[in-house]
Image (tube, rainbow, N blue to C red):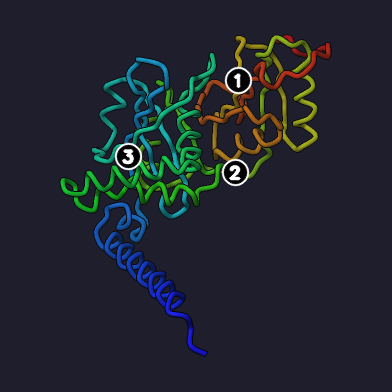
Amino acid sequence: MELPRRAVNVERTFALLALTAALALAWIEAGAPLAQRIQEGRPWLAWVAAQERGRDAAPRSHLLFYDTVRRRVVLLRVPETAKIRSLLPPVADRLQISLAPLWDEDEPVAEVARALKTRLRRPRAWARLLWTSWTRAPREGRAALDPLLFALELRLVPLERLEPTEWTEETPAPERMRRLLDGQQEPDDGHAVTAEVLNASGRTGLASRVAKMLRSKGVDVFMLGTTRPRARTMVYNRYGAFRRAMSVLASLDCPSARAVAQEDPRRAADVTVELGADCAGPAEPEDGDQP
């Protein structure tokens, strides 16, 4: 039975589109810097400029490391010091991110990391990436396609491998920079996660209740206390693999909480949990929240 002419034309159109997409992908992979780094298993670096909507402040700059082998993204906020800035390699690629208004006491690097992931849910963001790549291509060649390629790669990066990171003056920056450039992860000795739980919500008894819940899920909570009030709950990774903070974050069952890698050699725990007002719930007075 002969197919209708219209159906044949539709099939030919789809075949032509598939062939065009395959040729375009081959052309990109033949020369785009990010595609070459993926093939060679080397990390890709870019600057991320994040502008908070409704604010006139200058954009916040972050250095992005993409581990192309493990599909792991480290977004680094470094202190504005000449000592640490001198360690940064030359980076050409730049990404622009629009941030929602931040909460009081927010860690901006965590919001930038989340915005990188969530912006890809909007068709407008993909249209902007396509337009930017198209307009930059005459000047930059196939390197202009890197942000678009990274957006496609980022869809395959699970949230637990998206690591917002802050360095302090106490961070051994040369060693950490070498590990990032070599694509190495922080060591994980396999021991149970240790944590300190600090009440920053103003609700009496919250640290005690959360500590009991975390202990029931295998987290070794050995210290309770209070700290400065904050709106959002934060989980700080103080040592070792970032998965430790992510496992504690998942155990909290607080959707608005965030995790950040912020090394602090003065802390005895792997993870510090600062419980904000967002996850406080109703007040239930208990002992144990005072330092």
Question: How many marks are shown on the rendered structure?
Answer: 3
Circle nearer the N terminus (1, 2): 2
Front one among 137 and 158: 137
Question: Whole-percent x and y of residue 165?
Answer: 46, 31
In the picture, measured across the screen, residue 243 lies left or right of residue 54, that is right
* Depth check, front residue: 142 or 2: 2
Q: Nearer the viewer, mark 2 or mark 3?
A: 3
Circles 3 and 1, Cβ within 8 Å, touching? The answer is no
To which residue does mark 3 refer?
Answer: 46
Q: Label 2, label 3: how many angstroms apart (C-alpha)?
A: 31 Å
Indicate the secondary structure of the residue bearing disc 1: loop
Judged from the image, the secondary structure of the residue bearing numbered disc 2 is loop
29 in relation to 246, above or below: below
The residue located at (82%, 12%) in the rendering is 287
Relative height, residue 284 to residue 95 (above, below): above
Residue highlighted by disc 2: 189
Residue type at the position of mark 2: Asp
Q: Amino acid at mark 3?
A: Ala
Could you tell which of marks 2 and 3 lies nearer the N-terminus?
3
Question: Residue beneath label 1, please?
Answer: 232
Callout in the foreground (1, 2): 1
Query: Reading the chain from its start, which is encountered first: label 3 or label 1?
Result: 3
In the picture, residue 193 is in which quadrant? top right
Q: Which mark identifies residue 8?
A: none
| Whole-percent x, y for residue 174 in the image | 34, 33
Quadrant holding the C terminus: top right
